[in-house]
Image (tube, rainbow, N blue to C red):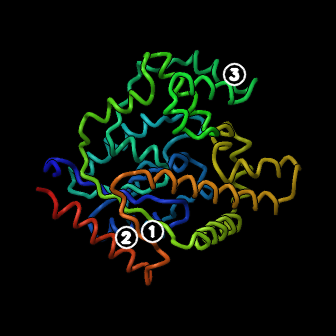
């Protein structure tokens, strides 16, 4: 049963280049909605081509929120996202608009929709700085060992390459005395204010998705990714850019370490790997209705299936 006072929210999730933005815009147009980005890199100004921000033609007049609003030199946490996205959803609901969440940052989507709560009491900037220094001096392994000791569930859940998240989990334990795992479990005991319909996009033939990724990277290069990356990497936001696929792979090219063709191939390879990680994440999420795009007769069939599921979950199952 769903609580009748829950706010209806649509979430379009899945791997990069699967068509999430196009579908989210279509759903917003047909169900009086607006789009809220759930992409951890599209929030930053200046990083447009490499993060695949939709242009005005792709938006088709649908307002998009939480996109292109933050200077890359500024830090931005999951807690920050949950706070801003919650405010945005409430504002849209007050105007009788359907919030349509769209993006592939699984931690953003899960934390928002499952009502994970964050507090400032678990912040320790000095400790965080020391942990970063340890990572720079000795690598990530000592931090992973500590995390395995204090919070094995988080050590299993967090990707070893996600150093920021590893450090955050250690910081939470040392400042609060409880683990990140326990914090998440406690917060989930508070019911979510949202009645959510999650639509996942995937391709049964994985080679089709990978070819879409390859074509997207080629298109980004034609649209000026090289020039954008050079400008971004030379600015104060280089730390943020070095976390984003499409920028960090070009840095060795700018240094003269290898040719442009190899850099482009590395972008494609890293994007394909990222798509795999996204699918692994969202496969673990309960309640996702998966649509296999390559098994549909066209985009209209994808949209119709999504609309049917939205109407079933959000507007005929409220009792």
Establish if 9 lies above or below 125.
Answer: below
Q: Residue 291 is drawn in which quadrant?
A: bottom left
Is 268 in front, or is 161?
161
Percent position of residue 159, x then y: 58, 41
Mark 3: few/some/many CA within 10 Å (<14, 14-19, 20+)? few
Q: Residue at x 23, y 39 (%)?
A: 191
Establish if 49 lies above or below 127.
Answer: below
Label 3 belongs to which residue? 133
Is 76 situated left or right of 229 in this image? left
Tell which circle, 2 or 3, labels the residue nearer the N-terminal end: 2
Circle on res. 293: none
Label 2 belongs to which residue? 26
Tell which circle, 3 or 1, labels the residue nearer the N-terminal end: 1
Q: Residue at x 41, y 18 (%)?
A: 121
Label 1 belongs to which residue? 22
For the C terminus, the quadrant is bottom left
Percent position of residue 150, x then y: 52, 22
Is 86 in front, or is 235?
86
Q: Residue at x 43, y 17 (%)?
A: 176
Percent position of residue 4, x then y: 13, 50
Q: CA distance from mark 3 to mark 1?
A: 42 Å
Q: Residue 62 is drawn in which quadrant?
A: bottom left
Cβ–Cβ below 8 Å for labels 3 and 1? no
Cβ–Cβ below 8 Å for labels 1 and 2? yes
């Amino acid at each position: 049963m769903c609580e009748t006072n829950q706010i209806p929210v649509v979430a379009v999730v899945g791997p990069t280049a699967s068509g999430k933005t196009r579908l989210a815009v279509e759903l917003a147009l047909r169900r009086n909605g607006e789009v809220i980005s759930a992409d951890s890199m599209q929030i930053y100004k200046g990083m447009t081509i490499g993060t695949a921000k939709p242009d005005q033609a792709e938006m088709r007049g649908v307002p998009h929120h939480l996109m292109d609003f933050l200077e890359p030199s500024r830090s931005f946490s999951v807690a920050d996202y949950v706070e801003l996205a919650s405010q945005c959803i409430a504002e849209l609901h007050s105007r009788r608009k359907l919030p349509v969440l769209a993006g592939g940052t699984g931690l953003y989507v899960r934390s928002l929709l499952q009502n994970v709560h964050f507090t400032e009491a678990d912040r320790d900037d000095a400790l965080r700085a020391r942990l970063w220094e340890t990572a720079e001096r000795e690598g990530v392994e000592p931090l992973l060992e500590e995390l395995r000791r204090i919070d094995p569930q988080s050590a299993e859940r967090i990707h070893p390459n996600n150093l920021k998240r590893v450090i955050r989990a250690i910081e939470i334990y040392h400042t609060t005395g409880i683990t990140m795992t326990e914090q998440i479990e406690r917060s989930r005991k508070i019911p979510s204010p949202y009645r959510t319909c999650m639509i996942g996009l995937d391709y049964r033939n994985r080679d089709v998705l990978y070819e879409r990724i390859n074509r997207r990277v080629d298109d980004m290069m034609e649209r000026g990714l090289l020039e954008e990356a050079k400008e971004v990497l030379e600015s104060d936001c280089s730390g943020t850019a070095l976390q984003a696929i499409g920028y960090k792979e070009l840095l060795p090219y700018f240094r003269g370490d290898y040719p442009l063709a190899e850099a482009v191939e590395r972008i494609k390879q890293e994007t394909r790997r990222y798509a795999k990680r996204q699918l692994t994440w969202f496969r673990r999420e309960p309640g996702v209705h998966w649509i296999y795009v390559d098994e549909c007769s066209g985009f209209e069939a994808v949209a119709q299936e999504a609309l049917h599921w939205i109407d079933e979950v959000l507007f005929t199952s409220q009792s």
